[in-house]
């Protein structure tokens, strides 16, 4: 296949995450994602090595017009943004999530630094470390503030394209395990490429996604598709079924903890629905989760009969005394073990359960546990545990369906394990 637009997959052909795709013409180029390697996927690198790699990639094919477009705000797609010297584009919701993340981190560092300084014998080395964390995080926030964004279009409307030189990029909303993910139609020199980013067909927000692809992903020369689940034969269950299974558990146990991501609006929606059906108060312990829920409520609260309208209670000892007899559902992240353990010690274990609602590889695969043991350690605090989860990625059957709909001249699978094949 001869193309006037050129493609280079810098990372992603033989690993999940760390994606970097370059597409260019004689005068212009765009990158789709500049992702950090996931723990245990791809070579572990230092920030200095990351900076050198980015500079090398960018310096080898300079064009008059160039920009980076991010499919979504997961670190394995956006994590190298600090090293990019030209325009960066992301969805409005993606930018908001990243700003919430880093502003919350900054607040935490500032509070810790202040406490450190007030100690009777201040730890100067720790104070200096926290000061450096504050400085570095402020720099990241300043960089994020320069990101350019697009507004998600309403259902049935054609998105506004963005021009980078002679390359035309059109973002299309898609369903993934993080808020406001997008696919891209990339056009130049009479060629049409389609980059799916990460997506799935079994979430609440995937309704209409295949109709969109059938309507707009036509005459595609090259399809660049994610293949996370290509090496897995299992079929992903729907997000609605996740909620139904959670309802069964919440009816059987008085005190329910759910381990999940604060940025996955649909999983939080499933939990929200289940708590309403079982009349359990929805509780949280994390300021980050509080703020993401506020964002989701503000932007999407009128959708799905209140599915994405959140009114969580922030956990305190005073709240515990009010909910002790009623029970609750507590949504938590893996880094909150130190907060959860004291509460767990006050609860009867026969009435308490953890719903583990994240990828099971985080606690089952040795390389993942070595990279981050918090998931496994959190899980092991509980006597009763049940896994209720579905993938944020498209399964093998749905990938084949998309390829069959598009009939592209060429298919490139990225974001996949090295031995995965269509």
Image: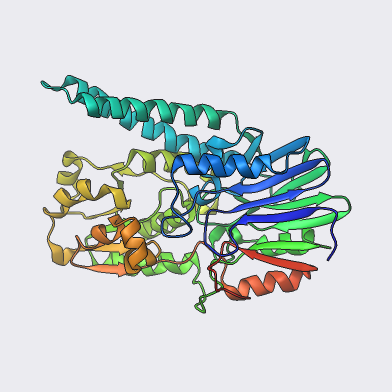
Taking the image as drawn, is residue 160 in sight? Answer: no
Q: Quadrant of residue 94?
A: top right
Rendered position, 348 above or below 186:
below
Rendered position, 249 above or below 74:
below
Q: Identify the residue at horizontal 84%, vertical 41% (top origin).
A: 166
Left or right: residue 405 versus residue 227 is right
- Give the color scheme: rainbow, by chain, secondary structure or one colour: rainbow
Tell me residue 235's x, y (percent).
52, 76
Q: Which image quarter holds the N terminus? A: bottom right
Q: Which image quarter holds the C terminus? A: bottom right
Tell me residue 260's x, y (percent).
37, 55
Q: Identify the residue at horizontal 73%, vertical 50% (top origin).
A: 23
Q: Quadrant of residue 121?
A: top left
Decide which of 373, 56 is in the foreground and name it: 56
Q: Residue furthest right?
A: 190
How many callouts does the rendering have? Answer: 0
Decide which of 36, 96 is in the foreground and name it: 36
Taking the image as drawn, is residue 126 in sight? Answer: yes
Tell me residue 5's x, y (percent).
81, 53
Rendered position, 298 above or below 224:
above
Q: Identify the residue at horizontal 55%, vertical 36% (top origin).
A: 83
Tell me residue 371's x, y (percent).
35, 56
């Amino acid at each position: 296949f001869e193309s006037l637009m050129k493609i280079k997959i810098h990372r992603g052909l033989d690993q999940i995450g760390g994606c970097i795709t370059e597409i260019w013409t004689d005068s212009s180029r765009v990158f789709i994602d500049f992702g950090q390697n996931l723990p245990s996927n791809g070579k572990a690198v230092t920030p200095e090595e990351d900076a050198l790699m980015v500079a090398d990639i960018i310096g080898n094919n300079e064009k008059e017009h160039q920009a980076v477009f991010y499919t979504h705000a997961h670190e394995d797609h956006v994590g190298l943004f600090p090293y990019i010297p030209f325009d960066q584009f992301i969805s409005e919701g993606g930018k908001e999530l990243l700003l919430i993340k880093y502003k919350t981190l900054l607040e935490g560092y500032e509070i810790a630094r202040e406490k450190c300084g007030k100690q009777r014998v201040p730890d100067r080395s720790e104070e200096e470390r926290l000061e450096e964390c504050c400085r570095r995080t402020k720099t990241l926030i300043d960089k994020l503030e320069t990101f350019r964004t697009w507004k998600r279009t309403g259902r049935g409307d054609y998105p506004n394209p963005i021009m980078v030189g002679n390359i035309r990029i059109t973002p299309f909303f898609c369903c993934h395990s993080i808020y406001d993910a997008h696919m891209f139609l990339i056009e130049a020199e009479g060629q049409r490429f389609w980059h799916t980013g990460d997506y799935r067909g079994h979430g609440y927000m995937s309704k209409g996604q295949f109709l969109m692809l059938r309507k707009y992903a036509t005459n595609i020369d090259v399809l660049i598709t994610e293949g996370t689940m290509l090496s897995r034969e299992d079929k992903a269950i729907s997000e609605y079924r996740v909620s139904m299974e959670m309802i069964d558990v919440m009816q059987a146990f008085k005190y329910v903890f759910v381990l999940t991501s604060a940025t996955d609006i649909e999983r939080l929606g499933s939990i929200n629905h289940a708590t309403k059906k079982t009349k359990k108060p929805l509780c949280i312990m994390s300021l980050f989760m509080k703020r993401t829920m506020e964002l989701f409520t503000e932007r999407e609260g009128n959708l799905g009969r209140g599915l994405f309208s959140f009114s969580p209670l922030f956990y305190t000892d005073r709240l515990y005394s009010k909910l002790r007899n009623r029970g609750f559902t507590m949504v938590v992240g893996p880094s909150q073990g130190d907060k959860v353990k004291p509460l767990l010690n006050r609860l009867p274990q026969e009435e308490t359960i953890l719903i583990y609602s994240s990828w099971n590889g985080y606690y089952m695969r040795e390389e993942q546990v070595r990279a981050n043991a918090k998931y496994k350690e959190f899980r092991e605090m509980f006597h009763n545990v049940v896994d209720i989860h579905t993938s944020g990625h498209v399964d093998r059957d749905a990938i084949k369906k998309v390829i069959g709909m598009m009939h592209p001249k060429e298919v490139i699978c990225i974001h996949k394990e090295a031995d995965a094949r269509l």
